[in-house]
Amino acid sequence: MKRTTGQNREITARWRPATRAVRGGSWRSEQGETSEAIYLTSGYCYEDAATPAARFAGQAPGMTYSRTQNPSVQMLEERIALMEGAEACRAQASGMAAMSSVLLCQLSQGDHMVIARAAFGPTRWVTDNLLPRFGIACTAIDGRDLEAWQDAIRPNTKIFFFETPANPTMDIVDIRAVSEIAHRHGITVVVDNAFATSALQRPLELGADIVAYAATKLMDGQGRVLAGAIAGSADFINNKLLPFQRNTGNTLSPFNAWVVLKGLETLELRAVQQAKNALTVARFLEGRVPQLLHPGLPSHPQHALVQAQMKAAGSVFAFTVEGGRAAAWKLLDALELIDISNNIGDTKSLMTHPASTTHSSLTPEVRADMGVSEGMLRLSVGLEDCEDLIEDLAQALACAGL
Ligand SMILES: *Cc1c(COP(=O)(O)O)cnc(C)c1O
């Protein structure tokens, strides 16, 4: 197998983001294939007995077992690292594998972390239910409030964790300011960047230490596979995450890695166009619904911050309707084009009712605290013609009597 220039950091360091997204990390077999190969293998064979011994001892490069190394997975890892501007990356079996691993690999009994309360439901389950079982405390705060981050710090605080934009309330966290507070206290900043991706927002350049991903969303972008990734310093990836992953097995399948690798080649095109479409559709809803939460609209209270740290506001937004759950469900049931689905970042436009799906595992109190109301709907805008999407929303609103 030949490493292409995509594996040469001296060369890829000169490449601009679009080139990295298409060619970064590629390897080529002796067949000279243009599209990266899928290495569906669990193990590797060796020419002689000394070779695996040297590899197991870490004294020679090369693969030993696909729980820790696989060529298709490594191509994806190198490409994501290059796109994020990270020293290293490790792919994960899913987005939640990434979120749980990034926390569990570096927290110990007696530690404390702080999370922005508006977060993906399962992430809050990990911080509110799983971590306390191992003696790790977590404080949930309003991530928009810089003083709240400062006030939550304890002598044993190890991690600040947040999503921005956050699911589904579209809260924005000031990555640079929160990272500065954290670093004054030796705290590690982890950002779940699934809603934006490196195409629209680069947390490491703004001061964050680690990016964690659901690659299931915009990175695959076509609703095919679950995947996750964690990118950061080589020291963190190799010395904290890798021992954890090697022994717990949150490994991504080579096939899924290949699918995401292909998705990354068109990530920027899709992310930019879907963000444009989302803004067009949101403008149609403005004034027609009581609350519209879209970070790209001047009406969003953090619009200036969005413009400062994001290239575009992303493809997902939320809105509320009068009449609570009954009215929200009526609108969903009346849709003819937009699908009822809790996924996001797909080329197909998808709508969900967070309170009864993605955020149903949380108590009503936690939901209310996060701002997830019974009348809230979340729309992930795809690549369809905006006129068709707007027509569908107009007829569904009318059907629901809204
Ligand atoms: C979907 C999602 C996750 C979890 O990803 P999975 O691949 O579904 O496990 C985590 N964080 C955010 C923000 C997400 O949207």
Image (cartoon, rainbow, N blue to C red):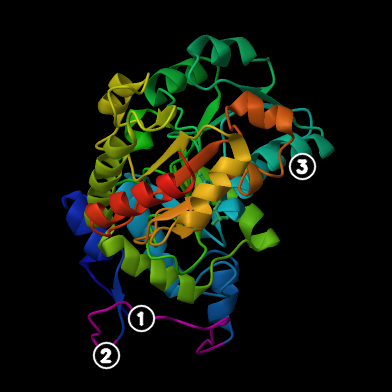
Within 8 Å: ligand 1 and the Cβ of disc 2? no
Residue identified by numbered label 3? 130
Q: Is residue 29 above or below residue 342?
A: below
**Mark 1 CB within 8 Å of ligand 1:** no
| Residue 353 seen from this side | no
Q: Nearer the viewer, residue 8 or 165?
A: 165
- Locate residue 312: give its quadrant: top left
Secondary structure mostly taken by the magenta-highlighted segment of the chain: loop
Depth check, mark 1 against mark 2: the one in front is 1
Query: Residue at label 1?
Result: 37
> Which residue is label 2 attached to?
31
Is residue 67 on the magenta stretch? no
Q: CA distance from mark 1 to mark 2?
A: 10 Å
Which residue is more in the foreground, 127 or 102? 127
Q: Residue at x 33, y 42 (%)?
A: 314
Image x and y of residue 349, in percent: 38, 56
Q: Secondary structure at mark 1?
A: loop
